[in-house]
Image (tube, helix red, strand yellow):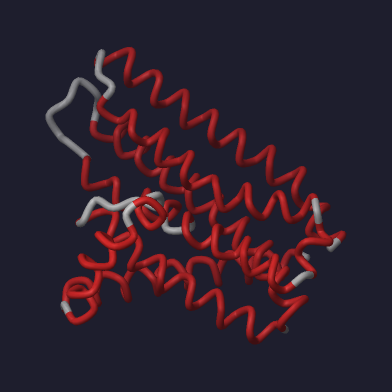
Amino acid sequence: MIQILSRWHTRQHALLTLALFNGSLLALRMAVTQSLFYGFLVWNLILAAIPYLVTWYLGENPILATKKRVLLAFSAVWLLFLPNAPYLITDFLHFRRETDMPEWFDILLLMAFAWNGLALAFCSMDAMQQFWARVWGVSTAWGMMLACCMLSGFGIYLGRFLRYNSWDLLCHPWDLLGDVTPLVLERESIGFSIGYGVFFFLSYGIADARKNNQS
């Protein structure tokens, strides 16, 4: 637990620096183009930060992470918002060539926000997996993380194509269930979910392996 707490300080500074860089890029673009077109990236990044805040709170209150039921409750909230982090990757669909900004700038902007979202996700996933490992064991923790990544892949699909967000599971659960049920057998939803889920899991695995090699 001490190892988890010792990382928060460095991670927070790095993530904050990256967020400030992203904000500067977006502010510059808005000033030049007089357009708020990419303003939605800020809200998407805020949603992507919620899982990180959940694990930060558990890190600040480590006794909570030792209680199975409490940890499961926090894990459910964490998973509910986790898809918002890799969802930022799909914001590349909004890329437009006909603007007052050079293409490389908009690509940099979208890439920076996407990486910020993934960095937030990887940090929170690392912490949550360690909480799980202490309660249920390392192998179970990895299995849970794989399942969460696959569910996140499906969550990205719901957000991008059906325009649902994390709040809808709480506010409109029956509407969501009615729309989700037919998707279980659709090739596109299955392929998308598996593709993005596997990519998310492998990317996290690479980040985790790099962290272990440096420790």
Residue 187, given in percent of the width and then of the height, sits at 16, 78
Query: Residue at point 62% right, 56% down?
Result: 123
Decide if residue 141 is on the left or right side of residue 215.
Answer: left
Judged from this view, the residue extending furthest toward the right is 2
Q: Position of residue 41 (x, y in %)?
A: 37, 36
Between 186 and 191, the one lying in front of the other is: 186
**Farthest-out residue, bottom:** 139
Q: Is residue 65 above or below residue 6?
A: below
Q: Residue at x 19, y 82 (%)?
A: 185
Looking at the picture, does residue 168 appear above or below residue 9? below
178 displayed left or right of 165: left
Q: Name the residue rendered at 73%, 55% in the picture.
A: 58
From what the image shows, is residue 87 above or below residue 19? below
The N terminus sits in image quarter: bottom right
| Camera-side residue of 108 and 143 | 143
Tell me how many marks there are: 0
Q: Position of residue 197 (x, y in %)?
A: 39, 71
Q: Split into 4 quadrants, where in the image is the C terminus?
A: bottom right
Coordinates of residue 84 in the picture (x, y in percent): 42, 52
Res 12 quadrant in image: top right
The residue depicted at 32 percent of the width and 54 percent of the height is 172
Is residue 57 positioned above or below 209 on the image? above
Q: For residue 15, which quarter of the picture?
A: top right
